[in-house]
Image (cartoon, rainbow, N blue to C red):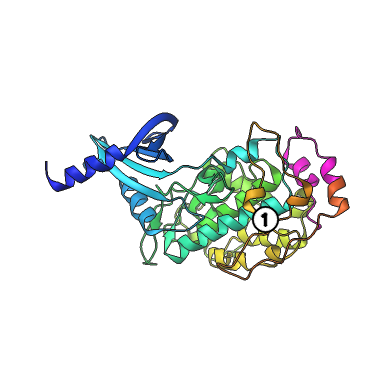
Amino acid sequence: MDAVEKANLERQKRWAKERKVGEGTYAVVYQGREVGTGRKVAIKKIKVGAMKDGLDMSAIREVKYLRELEHQNVISLLDVFSSKTNLNLVLEWLETDLEMIIKNHSLVFLPADIKSWIAMTLRGLEFCHRNFILHRDLKPNNLLIAADGQLKIADFGLARDFADPGYKMTCQVITRWYRPPELLFGCRYYSTAVDMWSVGCIFAELMLRTPYLPGESDMDQLKTIFRALGTPTEEEWPGHTKLPDYVPVGQFTKSSMRDLFTAATADCLNLLSKFFIYEPRKRISARDALHHPYFFALPNPTHPSKLPKISTQPSSRTLEEVDGNVDLDSPGPAVKAPAPVPNRLKRKLSSVSSNQDGRETYARRLDFSQ
């Protein structure tokens, strides 16, 4: 046994798989533990034996990028070892994901909670973009939540670097409901704006408690986008009719966001609209989004430890605790100190039923005016 094999065997013995918690086409995720300390971890076993040349490029990329990224809002890679035809990634253990929280209608979201989740998403994504890495699969299912409430961007299997602006990339990335129109039209040269469209979809979904733009096919996805945001003109999005897969989809008039997000403040709607600018070069960046007035107006973002979480225990969260403070010092200045919850917001919360459903109901119930 050579030195490399010996080191790999030692790393393998350090971690123990306990139970399967998820499975996809190319990977199985286990809950595991560190043998010496008992620390809980996630072990992602990637099946590489059947891949081209015996190794999956997405597995290589995921290891590469996670080794390069170290940020409180990006999942941590603890170790890597091989076993037969499998590559095993040892990741920090995270309790749940944002999709499960959104779908759990026993949880009531406050405007401050949504602000906190989006701030953490943007902070992690800004760090990725600053290091020239596109995620290319942002969605609530890939935003994991730690026990202390910190949100962490995960699943970098579709990520890639974008240091060379003239390098052609695939347009077959990003889960359809979160995919921007330039990719649906076959754009092969793109940058950070594709991730920002996805953040806008997540932002809207947090307010609606249901996906904002759920298309059933690529063509239906375009129609769904244009019904909501209007069919783009050449003035709004120069050159989009020349994209490789462009087809006329029909003429739709833009719907008023105010009609759907009836309780949102002007700052909230302004930021949301900037994620959905058709011209990718004009779409807001993660850094600029973190400096938007939305994050510096009341209510202050909820502290991660006070955010709603899935638990079998009754919540001890009080109304006085929900208006916490998230430090946005990287980038941007800190948010103002927390303010007391107004009586009017308390009255509105008391009227929210835990089993309400539907996008308009949730949008109207959220009070963004404080």
Question: Is residue 15 found left or right of 253 in the rendered image?
Answer: left
Front residue of 314 and 241: 314
- Between residues 211 and 28, which one lies in front from this camera angle? 28
Report the number of numbered marks: 1
Q: Which residues are magenta?
A: 348-370
Q: Nearer the viewer, residue 299 or 162?
A: 299
Q: Position of residue 279 (x, y in %)?
A: 57, 64
Extreme-bottom residue of the structure:
333
Locate residue 308: give its quadrant.
top right
Q: Amino acid at mark 1?
A: Lys
Kindly give the residue lying farthest to the top in the view shown.
Answer: 19
> Looking at the picture, how far across and down is residue 227, in whole percent?
67, 48
Q: Quadrant of residue 28?
A: top left
Label 1, secondary structure: give it: helix
Asked whether residue 191 appears in the rendered view, the answer is: no
The reply to whether the magenta stretch includes residue 164 is: no
Q: Quadrant of residue 2?
A: top left
Q: In what quadrant of the picture does the C terminus appear? A: bottom right
Residue beneath the point at 72% across and 64% down: 337
Residue at 45% x, 57% y is: 187
Q: Position of residue 11 (x, y in %)?
A: 27, 43
* Residue 112 visible at all: yes
Relative placement, left or right, of 157 versus 295 is: left
Question: Image height check: is 173 above or below 275?
Answer: above
**Which quadrant of the figure contains the N terminus?**
top left
Question: Is residue 218 shown left or right of residue 8?
Answer: right
Label 1: which residue? 115
Q: Residues within 10 Å of mark 1 (few under 14, many from 20)?
A: many
Q: Residue furthest left?
A: 1
Residue 51: % across, % down: 27, 39
Residue 198, relative to residue 126: is it above or below? above
